[in-house]
Image: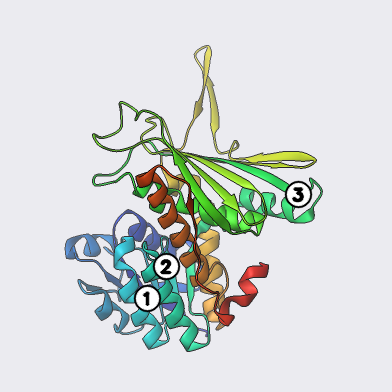
């Protein structure tokens, strides 16, 4: 494929607009061919100054727009299933932001639809797998020098939550990244979830159970705890420490700038995930473009998206009931057999 890969971007909000910019200016080998968003003015703003881009309110119309050869889905999670299935019907490769589909049943329908095709078309946007620090930690754990991983301690903090953010979304939206990162780093599946919560922060919107402490047990005998705090007020922070039999390793400390002036010093803290993980997003999209132009699909797939949604769903039940909740995964289709060994 010598020409630029024509991509339809579905969703022109914060994430979608950033991907439009990235496809045209941050990565090589691709161009934005179409954009879809229910808010047409927002879609037009996202592609302002770009020639040859069609704008649509209907995401399916964007899939059929001239020049579209692949799809990047950056709309809200509940809107993902329909365009994913439509892309499969058209044989279009897809990069879908997480959550692939928020509910496990819908995510499983996507897995089953792709399995019926007999080939992978979807890559799911778990961008932490492309972050330099996470990749170093993965390499270290896979090397075995620290022995068997026993625990992962994780922190996930946001400055503030957007309007409409719910207590369940702390798990199925925010912690979904830690779910996938833990599965990938450990090579293990979560088997049970417990959610503990302190008295909510006074800065949390009324009714929002924030922060939470989410504890996962895995089939390899490891424990993973995640402090998720989406109204911390001071910055965006993501950290992970692996505690192993013969040592530990921690990431997430290096993305700050120390500023010294006027007899004092202060550290700058990222305010946004697009800042903290900018390089990871660039690597992720570049890898997807390169693979798609070669007729391949790499990276986390639909099974990973389903597994994350199933674990998150168990986590939401644990939050609602206050009880330890087991995770139930459907049988893994043969198409994804190799994913178990990644």
Kindly indicate whether the residue at mark 1 contacts the one at mark 3 (C-beta within 8 angstroms). Answer: no
Q: Which of labels 2 and 3 is toward the front?
A: 3
Spot occupied by residue 210 in the image (x, y as percentages of width and height): 36, 36
In the rendered view, tell whether residue 21 sits above or below residue 158.
below
Earlier residue among tags 2 and 3: 2
Residue at 36%, 28% (x, y): give it. 199
Q: Residue furthest top?
A: 263
In this rendering, is residue 306 above or below 311? below
Circle on res. 96: 2
Task: Give the alpha-carbon distance from disc 3 to disc 1, as whole Å.
Answer: 37 Å
Residue ID for mark 1: 84
Q: How many labels, in total?
A: 3
Q: Can see residue 128?
A: no
Callout 2 secondary element? strand
First along the sequence among labels 2 and 1: 1
**Is 136 left, or right, of 259 in this rendering?**
right
Rendered image: mark on residue 30: none
- Residue 310 image-quadrant placement: bottom left
Residue 275 appears left or right of 81: right
Q: Which mark is residue 148?
A: 3
**Front residue of 302 and 253:** 302
How far across and how far down the image is residue 259, in percent?
Answer: 53, 25
Q: Are marks 2 and 1 in contact (CB under 8 Å)?
A: yes
* N-terminal-most mark, 3 or 1: 1
Callout 1: SS: helix
Q: Assess disc 3: are there few (<14), some (14-19) or many (≥20) residues with their C-alpha within 10 Å of its C-alpha.
A: some
Q: Is residue 328 visible?
A: yes
SS for tag 3?
loop
């Amino acid at each position: 494929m010598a020409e630029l890969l024509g991509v339809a971007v579905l969703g022109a909000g914060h994430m979608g607009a950033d991907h439009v910019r990235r496809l045209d200016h941050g990565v090589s080998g691709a161009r934005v061919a179409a954009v879809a968003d229910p808010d047409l003015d927002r879609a037009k703003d996202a592609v302002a100054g770009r020639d040859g881009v069609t704008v649509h309110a209907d995401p399916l119309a964007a899939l059929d727009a001239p020049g579209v050869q692949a799809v990047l889905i950056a709309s809200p999670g509940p809107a993902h299933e329909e365009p994913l299935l439509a892309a499969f019907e058209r044989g279009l490769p897809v990069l879908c932001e997480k959550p692939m589909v928020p509910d496990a049943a819908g995510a499983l329908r996507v897995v089953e639809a792709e399995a019926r095709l007999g080939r992978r078309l979807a890559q799911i946007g778990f961008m932490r797998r492309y972050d330099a620090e996470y990749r170093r930690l993965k390499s270290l754990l896979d090397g075995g020098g620290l022995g068997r991983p026993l625990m992962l301690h994780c922190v996930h903090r946001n400055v503030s939550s957007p309007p409409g953010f719910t207590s369940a979304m702390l798990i199925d939206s925010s912690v979904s990244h830690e779910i996938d990162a833990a599965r990938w780093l450990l090579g293990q599946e979560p088997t049970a979830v417990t959610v503990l919560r302190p008295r909510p922060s006074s800065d949390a919107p009324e009714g929002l159970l924030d922060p939470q402490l989410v504890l996962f047990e895995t089939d390899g005998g490891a424990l993973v705890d995640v402090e998720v705090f989406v109204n911390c007020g001071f910055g965006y922070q993501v950290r992970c420490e692996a505690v192993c039999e013969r040592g530990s390793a921690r990431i997430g400390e290096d993305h700050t700038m120390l500023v010294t002036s006027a007899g004092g010093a202060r550290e700058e803290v990222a305010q946004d995930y697009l800042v903290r993980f900018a390089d990871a997003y660039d690597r992720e999209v570049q890898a997807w473009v390169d693979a798609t132009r070669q007729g391949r699909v790499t990276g986390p797939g639909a099974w990973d998206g389903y597994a994350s949604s199933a674990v998150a769903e168990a986590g939401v039940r644990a939050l609602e009931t206050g009880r330890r909740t087991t995770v139930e995964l459907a049988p893994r289709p043969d198409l994804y057999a190799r994913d178990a060994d990644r």
